[in-house]
Image (tube, rainbow, N blue to C red):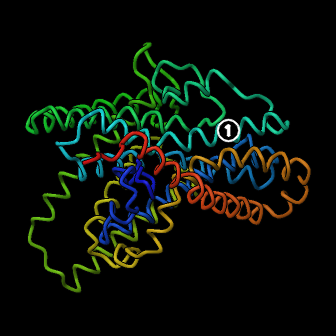
């Protein structure tokens, strides 16, 4: 769910190529950048309106917490998109070792960068404790592999750990198994995975660090189920492309209504309304439908959003995701605690300004850390062959 200029969880492949996020989405997939941006916005809202941040102030922030409870579903959406693009860009001639190197190039630099920021913040007294040993697990992509008991300072990097190992798992399957074989057992993995998760979480589909029966890690199952579902979406998309389609006014209207409704449903129920229905699998079903419609690009919504602005929004999502937790600590220390009255008096402005700050910092991180680090590691792990 990372391309070198984008968030692989939803659309990237070989980051070490350093040829641009647009190369991997291609013009007809620019609109996926918009979906990725929406997903990271939902994650931002659920984290920043939590009890550990603005929610601790009470007031209207308590309503924010209640209405945005389902924002965590965005990580499921990221896994689905990751599975799709992994299948779309799979190259059998690429070795497993080289694939692992590419994942390290893409994922590792920002993990290191954010941990350095937390270390500095600990030294100056902003962060109370730099969790050394759990942060080492984060550097090894083990923070949510099932062998860890808690996460380090980053916290939400559990998603990165799962993405790393599950991507390798599916790449290995695609490379060494026959398609007839994995077309049989991947749907079984998806069905069993989501069945287990729905029942063990009572339909909430949340709680990643937990492990049931000492072996079934919830976070890893999110990745296995989600990326497997993304592969099934890929197969269905390939099938739909081959079917005859008449681009008429009627069909455009129908597709536009479907796109608009599903987009509104996913955004509203995930980020702005506490869904009364107790089984959140319905949000995954809705997102799959929305994702397929955006891939087909037959309605006005997906066509209008298929532009370079969506591409630009999407390319900063990885940096945004990785750094927003650190900035939450900074803002709490320098803004929320000293200015509680202002935050309560202007809640919408406080949340908006927090988002703008996170986005600006993500842009800076992208250009000064993410891209240069990717290029540097590529030279080290894939040195040019001399003639």
Percent position (x, y) of residue 304?
A: 39, 79
Report crowding for label 1: few under 14, some 14 to 19, many 20 or more residues within 10 A (C-alpha): few
Q: Nearer the viewer, residue 22 or 267?
A: 22
Percent position (x, y) of residue 136?
A: 59, 25
Q: Secondary structure at mark 1?
A: helix
Residue 164 shows up from this direction: yes
Percent position (x, y) of residue 308?
A: 43, 75
Residue that appears at 30% across and 52% down: 85
Q: Quadrant of residue 272?
A: bottom right
Left-right relation of 45 to 204:
right
Residue that appears at 45% across and 70% down: 310
Left-right relation of 338 to 4:
right
Q: Which residue is mark 1?
A: 116
Q: Quadrant of residue 347?
A: bottom right
Residue that appears at 45% across and 18% down: 212
Which residue is the extreme one toward the bottom?
A: 249
Q: Quadrant of residue 271?
A: bottom right
Residue 204 shows up from this direction: no
Q: Nearer the viewer, residue 196 or 91?
A: 91
Left-right relation of 277 to 224:
right
Percent position (x, y) of residue 335?
A: 85, 53
Q: How many marks?
A: 1
């Amino acid at each position: 769910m990372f391309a070198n200029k984008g968030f692989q969880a939803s659309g990237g492949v070989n980051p070490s190529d350093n040829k641009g996020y647009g190369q991997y989405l291609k013009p007809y997939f620019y609109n996926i950048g918009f979906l990725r941006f929406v997903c990271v916005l939902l994650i931002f809202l659920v984290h920043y309106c939590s009890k550990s941040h603005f929610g601790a102030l009470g007031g209207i922030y308590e309503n924010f917490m209640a209405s945005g409870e389902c924002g965590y579903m965005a990580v499921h959406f990221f896994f689905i998109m990751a599975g799709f693009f992994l299948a779309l860009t799979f190259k059998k001639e690429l070795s497993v070792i080289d694939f692992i190197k590419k994942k390290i190039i893409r994922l590792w630099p920002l993990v290191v960068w954010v941990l350095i920021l937390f270390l500095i913040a600990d030294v100056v007294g902003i962060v109370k404790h730099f969790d050394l040993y759990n942060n080492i697990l984060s550097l090894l992509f083990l923070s949510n592999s099932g062998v860890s008991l808690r996460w380090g300072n980053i916290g939400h990097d559990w998603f990165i750990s799962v993405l790393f190992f599950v991507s390798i798992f599916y790449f290995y399957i695609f490379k060494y198994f026959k398609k007839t074989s994995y077309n049989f057992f991947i749907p079984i993995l998806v069905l069993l995975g989501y069945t287990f998760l729905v029942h063990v979480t009572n339909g909430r589909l949340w709680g990643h660090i937990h492990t049931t029966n000492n072996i079934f890690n919830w976070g890893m199952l999110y990745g296995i189920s989600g990326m497997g579902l993304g592969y099934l979406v890929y197969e269905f998309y390939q099938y739909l492309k081959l079917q005859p389609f008449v681009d008429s006014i009627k069909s455009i209207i129908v597709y536009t209504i479907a796109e608009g409704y599903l987009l509104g449903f996913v955004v509203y129920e995930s980020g702005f309304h506490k869904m009364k229905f107790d089984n959140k699998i319905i949000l995954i079903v809705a997102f799959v439908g929305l994702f397929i419609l955006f891939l087909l690009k037959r309605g006005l919504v997906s066509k209008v959003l298929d532009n370079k602005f969506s591409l630009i929004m999407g390319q900063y999502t990885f940096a945004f995701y990785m750094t927003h937790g650190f900035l939450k600590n900074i803002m709490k220390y320098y803004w929320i605690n000293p200015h509680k009255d202002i935050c309560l008096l202007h809640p919408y402005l406080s949340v908006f300004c927090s988002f703008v700050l996170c986005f600006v910092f993500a842009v800076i991180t992208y250009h000064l850390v993410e891209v240069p680090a990717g290029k540097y590691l590529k030279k080290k792990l894939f040195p040019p062959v001399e003639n």
